[in-house]
């Protein structure tokens, strides 16, 4: 006599499972790509509702600041010190699709759970891959419906606004303080990289991006080839570190000047970015963090389709202490 299989209602099972696993899904999203993990900063920056994030970009000093005599007067003339930054929220969508035939064939609770979670993992991994790729973009892909990535905010041509428009709405030509640091055509890493035989462009960029203890790079993101060049240049056993370990979530990295150096396959070849996560990170809308739609289907097809959405934007709060080196070869 065949065994009895408990039939599970897929709709209610999907809803309850995604609700219970929301935190787990968010953590899994972070672990797929090192740049995503670094710049999402454990979802530490959130903005509910709205179409954009608006923040002040502080620059310059208070002009009336001066030494004065004991009976002198302080100049209280107000000085403009900030411009508004506006970063448009962007929306990402993916789908988890199963057929009614698959649901019927996997009616048992355990099998249905495995089927469902496989589709969910595929959707979240796909979103992570797209977001990870767009981190290195200039904001022109997907018809301009993506966020401005590092190619725009930490540009290899910092004196020119990217094709997607001024970063956060601030034109760089009339705001020289809004330029990032850039070195292009770096050439041989053996000659110009860490402990290079000619000079050390990496250390030079580190210093250019450092001002006291408050403004200094907190991490490096580089392509795999540059990461390998650095590993080969080390004069001792490479020290692997887990700088962002939270529970079982971590990425291995090499250490440079007390900060982690990550390699990311999605970073353009020959390139490395000097990141300060105080100045560049994602903002997310907590109301649209892996939000799943109700059941959808195509006409005349036995399909159960759920759409998952994510609302976020990459914000550059300051660019003068961010840097990029491009064009490294062996």
Image (cartoon, rainbow, N blue to C red):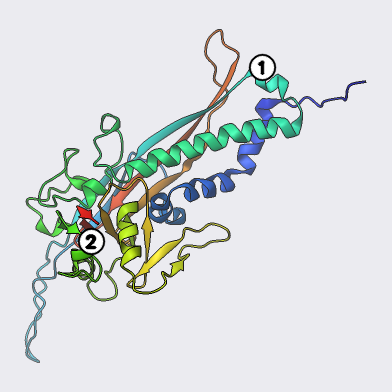
- Cα separation between marks 2 and 1: 56 Å
Q: What element carries label 1?
A: helix
Please identify the residue farthest to the right as the structure is shown: 1
Numbered mark located on residue 228 in the image: none
Is residue 258 or residue 268 the one in the foreground? 268
Instruction: Residue at 42%, 56% (x, y): give it.
Output: 41
Horizontally, is 209 left or right of 52 in the view?
left
Q: Indicate which label's residue lies in the foreground, 2 or 1.
A: 2
- Left/right placement of residue 297 relative to residue 131 reads right
Residue at the image position 41 percent from the left and 49 percent from the top: 36
Q: Can residue 326 be seen in this view?
A: no
The x, y position of residue 128, in whole percent, is 44, 42
Q: Which of marks 2 and 1 is nearer the N terminus?
A: 1
Name the one closer to the observer, 290 or 229. 229
Badge 2 density bin: few <14, some 14–19, many ≥20, Cα 10 Å: many
**How many numbered marks does the figure carry?**
2
- Residue nearest the viewer, comparing 97 with 236: 236
Sort mark 1 into few (<14), some (14-19) or many (20+) by Cα contacts within 10 Å: few
Specify whether residue 236 is in view: yes
Q: In which quarter of the image is the C terminus?
A: bottom left
Task: Locate residue 247, reporting x and y percent.
Answer: 58, 61
In the current view of this chain or complex, which residue is farthest to the bottom? 70
Q: Is residue 245 left or right of residue 68?
A: right
Q: In this view, does 216 lie above or below 135?
A: below
Mark 2 highlights which residue?
189
Quadrant containing the N terminus is top right
Depicted 49 relative to depicted 79: above or below:
above
What residue is at 72 percent from the left and 25 percent from the top?
106
Are the residues tagged 2 and 1 within 8 Å (C-beta)? no
Query: Within the image, what quadrant is residue 105 found in?
Result: top right
Label drawn at residue 101:
1
The part of the image, by quadrant, that contains residue 229 is bottom left
């Amino acid at each position: 006599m065949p065994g009895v299989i408990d039939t599970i209602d897929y709709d209610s099972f999907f809803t309850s499972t995604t609700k219970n696993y929301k935190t787990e899904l968010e953590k899994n999203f972070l672990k797929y790509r090192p740049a995503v993990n670094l710049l999402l900063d454990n979802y530490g920056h959130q903005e509910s509702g709205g179409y954009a994030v608006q923040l002040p970009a502080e620059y310059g000093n208070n002009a009336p600041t001066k030494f004065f005599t004991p009976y002198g007067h302080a100049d209280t003339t107000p000085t403009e010190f900030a411009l508004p930054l506006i970063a448009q929220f962007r929306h990402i969508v993916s789908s988890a699709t199963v057929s009614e035939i698959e649901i019927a064939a996997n009616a048992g609770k355990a099998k249905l759970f495995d089927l469902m979670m496989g589709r969910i993992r595929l959707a979240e991994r796909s979103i992570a891959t797209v977001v990870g790729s767009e981190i290195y973009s200039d904001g022109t892909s997907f018809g301009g419906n993506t966020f401005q990535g590092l190619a725009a905010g930490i540009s290899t041509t910092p004196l020119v606004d990217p094709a997607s428009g001024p970063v956060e709405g601030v034109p760089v030509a009339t705001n020289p303080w809004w330029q990032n640091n850039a070195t292009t055509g770096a050439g041989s890493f053996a000659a110009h990289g860490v402990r290079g035989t000619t000079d050390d462009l990496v250390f030079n960029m580190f210093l250019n991006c450092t001002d006291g203890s408050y403004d200094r790079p907190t991490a490096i993101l580089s392509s795999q080839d540059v990461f390998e060049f650095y590993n080969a240049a080390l004069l001792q056993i490479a020290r692997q570190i887990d700088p962002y370990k939270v529970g079982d979530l971590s990425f291995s990295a090499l250490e440079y000047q007390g900060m982690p150096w990550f390699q990311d396959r999605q970073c353009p070849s020959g390139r490395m970015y000097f990141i300060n996560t105080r100045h560049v990170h994602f903002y997310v809308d907590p109301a649209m963090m892996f939000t799943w739609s109700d059941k959808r289907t195509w006409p005349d097809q036995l399909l159960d389709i759920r759409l998952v959405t994510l609302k976020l934007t990459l914000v550059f709060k300051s660019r003068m202490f961010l840097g990029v080196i491009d064009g490294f070869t062996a």
